[in-house]
């Protein structure tokens, strides 16, 4: 696990760092946070208790079907209340504008606007890839995902990459009995600057997903979105199968 310089155990600075980490890496346990920041578990739990009490964070409940044996460690995510607490007049104006655009031009007009919104990301991503190639730096699937996560974080999306390895059993009917190991990744966005607007206009999420697919050169799948009520926008990305040449 990546480690950061230890903050002091008390005060607003520590809580702000904890909030930032939970936004980016949640669901996350008190033990993980203590290791990340070099704090004692007791100190972290005191801050988490306070943040949970004021509604900034909430416990992440794992579905029963996904639980293993024993009691799972208590983990936390940023609360829906905290994520939507910054709504202001600009959000209302954006919502009104998109509502009007939808009435006048329909879904096509909304998708054109959403495409124009993400076009600068794609140009910037291409420029960064070109710069890495010119410098002789690797630009394989893993590097592209990390580069995209960095770019999205710069645009306010608090993005992290979570590698996953899936063991797929063989298919006897196809003459293949040996299991395969498929490497995938999840791109997790703990914050979305247009979450409230996207809740009413999911076209924004759809176009963003298509842009992610184009930038990475693989078919991706959105598993969950903040606009849909999840604790993060989660996009499934294949690394060893389905890659475009």
Image (spheres, rainbow, N blue to C red):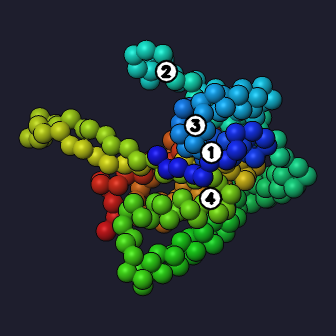
Query: Callout 1: few (<14), some (14-19), or many (20+) C-alpha neighbours within 10 Å?
Result: many
Residue 114 at x, y percent in the picture: 67, 61
Residue 94 is at least partly visible in this image: yes
Please report contact status of discs 1 and 4: CB closer than 8 Å, yes or no: no
Q: Is residue 245 above or below residue 52?
A: below
Residue 244 at x, y percent in the picture: 34, 64
Please report contact status of discs 2 and 4: CB closer than 8 Å, yes or no: no
Nearer the observer: mark 4 or 3; the answer is 3
Q: Is residue 196 above or below residue 107?
A: above
C-alpha separation, residue under disc 1 versus residue under disc 4: 13 Å
Give the quarter of the image for residue 149.
Answer: bottom right
C-alpha separation, residue under disc 4 versus residue under disc 3: 23 Å
Q: Earlier in the sequence, mark 4 or mark 3?
A: 3
C-alpha separation, residue under disc 2 versus residue under disc 3: 18 Å
Q: Earlier in the sequence, mark 2 or mark 1?
A: 1
Instruction: From the image, tell me which residue sits under label 1.
Output: 21
Q: Secondary structure at mark 1?
A: helix
Horizontal relation, residue 59 to residue 218: left or right: right
Horizontal relation, residue 148 to residue 181: left or right: right
Residue 34: mark: 3
Q: Residue at x 31, y 40 (%)?
A: 166
Q: Earlier in the sequence, mark 2 or mark 4?
A: 2
Q: Earlier in the sequence, mark 3 or mark 1?
A: 1
Instruction: From the image, tell me which residue sits under label 2.
Output: 72
Query: Callout 4: few (<14), some (14-19), or many (20+) C-alpha neighbours within 10 Å?
Result: some
C-alpha separation, residue under disc 2 versus residue under disc 4: 30 Å
Front-lying residue, 38 or 200:
38
Q: Residue at x 26, y 38 (%)?
A: 167
Instruction: From the image, tell me which residue sits under label 4.
Output: 153
Give the quarter of the image for residue 140.
Answer: bottom left
């Amino acid at each position: 696990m990546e480690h950061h310089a230890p903050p002091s155990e008390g005060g607003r600075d520590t809580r702000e760092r904890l909030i930032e980490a939970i936004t980016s890496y949640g669901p996350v346990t008190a033990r993980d946070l203590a290791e990340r920041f070099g704090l004692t578990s007791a100190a972290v739990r005191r801050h988490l208790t306070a943040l949970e009490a004021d509604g900034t964070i909430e416990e992440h409940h794992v579905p029963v079907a996904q639980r293993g044996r024993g009691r799972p460690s208590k983990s936390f995510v940023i609360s829906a209340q905290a994520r939507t607490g910054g709504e202001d007049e600009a959000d209302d104006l954006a919502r009104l504008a998109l509502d009007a655009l939808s009435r006048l031009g329909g879904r096509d007009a909304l998708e054109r606007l959403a495409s124009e919104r993400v076009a600068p990301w794609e140009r910037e991503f291409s420029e960064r890839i070109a710069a890495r190639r010119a410098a002789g730096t690797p630009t394989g699937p893993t590097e592209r995902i990390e580069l995209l996560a960095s770019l999205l974080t710069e645009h306010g999306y608090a993005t992290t990459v979570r590698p996953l390895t899936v063991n797929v059993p063989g298919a006897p009917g196809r003459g293949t009995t040996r299991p395969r190991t498929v490497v995938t990744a999840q791109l997790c966005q703990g914050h979305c600057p247009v979450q409230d607007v996207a809740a009413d206009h999911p076209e924004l999420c759809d176009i963003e997903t298509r842009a992610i697919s184009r930038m990475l050169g693989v078919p991706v799948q959105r598993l969950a979105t903040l606009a849909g009520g999840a604790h993060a926008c989660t996009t499934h990305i294949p690394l060893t199968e389905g890659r475009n040449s």
